[in-house]
Amino acid sequence: MRSVRIHLFLTTFILICIGVVVIYSASSIYSLERYHDSFFFLKRHLIFLLLGILAMFFVMSMDYKKLKEISKPLLLVAIALLLLVLVPGIGREVSGARRWFRFKIISFQPSEFANLAIIVYAADFISRKETAIRTSVKALFPIIAVLGTCSLLILMQPDLGTTVAISFVIFTMLFLSGVRISYFLYMITGVIPLLYLLVFSVPYRRNRIMAFLNPWADPRGTGFQIIQSQVAFGSGGFFGVGLGRSMQKLFYLPAAHTDFIFSIIGEELGLFGTVAVIALFCAFIISCLKIVKNISDRFGYLLCLGLTLMISFKALVNIGVSCGILPTKGLPLPFISYGGSSLIFDMVGLGLIMNISRSAEA
């Protein structure tokens, strides 16, 4: 699988390079206006990228099977951090959301660490209890309790997008492990009313859904971001307006260097650029699935599968939101969007996948 790992690394390297270039293009005017430094976000992104590379090489050098031994402590640390971030004065609040710890120039989002911890715990739990969870719904209680506890804490930040992402990953891992469909029906029956309340009882979430269905009903309010994103794609045409020449980044499209960076790619590099990025993500996913297919160790298989699902889901949702085919969710585009914690833990995920692949050859 050495050739697959090389292909995976090169694909990720190209995505990261695209991210560095587009982050500077999308953020330079905004950062010059706000921070009097056009390189402000680029320099911070490069710092996070360096930390991510160091973290990637660290997890590549360790024995990934040791994660089984510390899966529960990792989970307890994640839950403690999710609790701490909700405490006023400890967690940093931005636009009504309390999701970050701030250490001078570095921000840390504990939900990203929690994603990794839950996937490691789920891989360990399923690999030990696989026979039991196929025949007894009661055997699923520990993993459902863990997922429910972490989801509740993440929802309190509030962050529905991350909750949906980790729930999708864990349920897919359980499904591919042979859990009966009838068990999922029981769980989904209980979750649907709760999901309905979470979306339609909270005004800003309900407004997002309404804006997704008809953004032109409120073009200067809730529909503004989606409309400006679509304007960016329309302006780009087939080959784009040219790198650095985006008009939407000039304070028209909010979060141009984070959640909607794919729209800037569409405007500056056109359909050609967006298709190239999608093709790179497809190549990334295919390489990861080839690795998953060849892993005999059950824990390694499930861990690799979970990490692949998480990165793939975030990419799919981000692209779907930017194109207007999914409601707005605050999930970054892996390896491309500006965002410290997300980039670092995506790099950790990549390192673990490559580690598991190399160990499978031994």
Image (cartoon, helix red, strand yellow):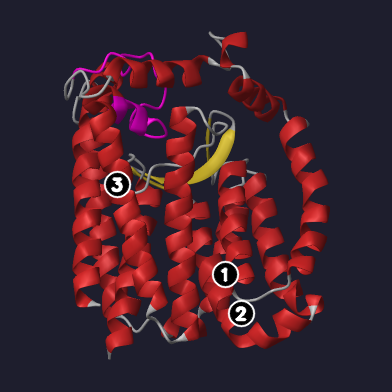
In the foreground, 272 or 332: 272
Q: Residue 176: x, y in percent? A: 58, 71
Quadrant of the rendering where the N terminus is positioned? bottom left
Residue 256 drawn at (x, y percent): 36, 26
Q: Secondary structure at mark 2?
A: helix
Pointer 1: what residue? 75
Residue to which mark 2 is pinned: 125
Q: Which quadrant is the C terminus positioned in?
A: bottom left
Residue 321 in the figure: left or right of residue 207: left
Extent of the magenta region: 245-266
Amino acid type at circle 2 is Phe
The amino acid type of the residue labelled 1 equals Leu
Task: Answer with the quarter of the image where residue 7 lies.
Answer: bottom left
Find disc 3 in the rendering and name its residue: 279
- Circle 3 residues within 10 Å: few <14, some 14–19, many ≥20: few
Is 163 magenta? The answer is no
Q: Residue at x 48, y 20 (%)?
A: 225
Q: Taking the image as drawn, is residue 104 in sight?
A: yes
Residue under the image location 25 percent in, 55 percent down: 12
State if disc 3 and disc 2 touch (CB < 8 Å): no
The residue type indicated by label 3 comes to Ala
Q: Residues within 10 Å of mark 1 (few under 14, many from 20)?
A: many
Front disc: 1 or 3: 3
